[in-house]
Image: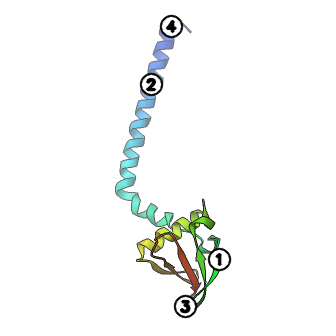
Amino acid sequence: MNPEERDALAQVVSNRIQHILGEKEDLENLLIVLGKPILDTKKLQYDAMKVVTRQTEGSKGYYLKAIPEDNQNNRDFELLIEDLKQHNGKLTKQGYFCWLFDDQKTAGMKPSKK
């Protein structure tokens, strides 16, 4: 391949890269407008039973306490905390009543009475 052909090929590759990057930006913008609510809902799908808990006794009896130190790099714990924050600190998930402590980082869980 001579230098002119190499330069021409480099220009074609560069143009194609620019085109792909433009398409990527267009798709990201479309996702923000149309798909974000759907993705946000899917992001909150988690298994509360995969959260590491400690049995603790409180004024109303025994419950499970989930703390950040026991759940490092645990996506299910992170999503539980995020879900609790979106539901004013209380929700029922997989048959458990869950609540968020004042520190906004610790969760409590006990079997739901329903």
Q: In 3D space, how far apart are the residues under numbered discs 3 and 1 (Cα atoms)?
A: 16 Å
Q: In 3D space, how far apart are the residues under numbered discs 4 and 3 (Cα atoms)?
A: 81 Å
Q: Amino acid at mark 4?
A: Pro
**Residue bearing mark 4:** 3
- Please give the name of the residue rendered at 42% of the width and 26% of the height, measured from the top-left corner: 15
Mark 3 neighbour class, 10 Å CA radius: few under 14, some 14 to 19, many 20 or more: few
State the image quarter where residue 67 is shown.
bottom right
- Please give the name of the residue rendered at 46% of the width and 15% of the height, measured from the top-left corner: 8
Which badge, 3 or 1, comes first in the chain's sequence?
1
Which badge, 4 or 3, comes first in the chain's sequence?
4
Q: In the image, residue 37 lies at what x, y percent?
A: 40, 63
* Marks 4,3: beta carbons within 8 A: no
**10, above or below 94, in the image:** above
Q: Nearer the viewer, mark 1 or mark 2?
A: 1
Mark 1 neighbour class, 10 Å CA radius: few under 14, some 14 to 19, many 20 or more: few
Q: In the image, residue 73 lies at what x, y percent?
A: 60, 59
Q: Nearer the viewer, mark 1 or mark 4?
A: 1
- Secondary structure type for disc 1: strand
Q: In 3D space, how far apart are the residues under numbered discs 2 and 3 (Cα atoms)?
A: 67 Å
**Residue bearing mark 2:** 14
Which badge, 2 or 4, comes first in the chain's sequence?
4
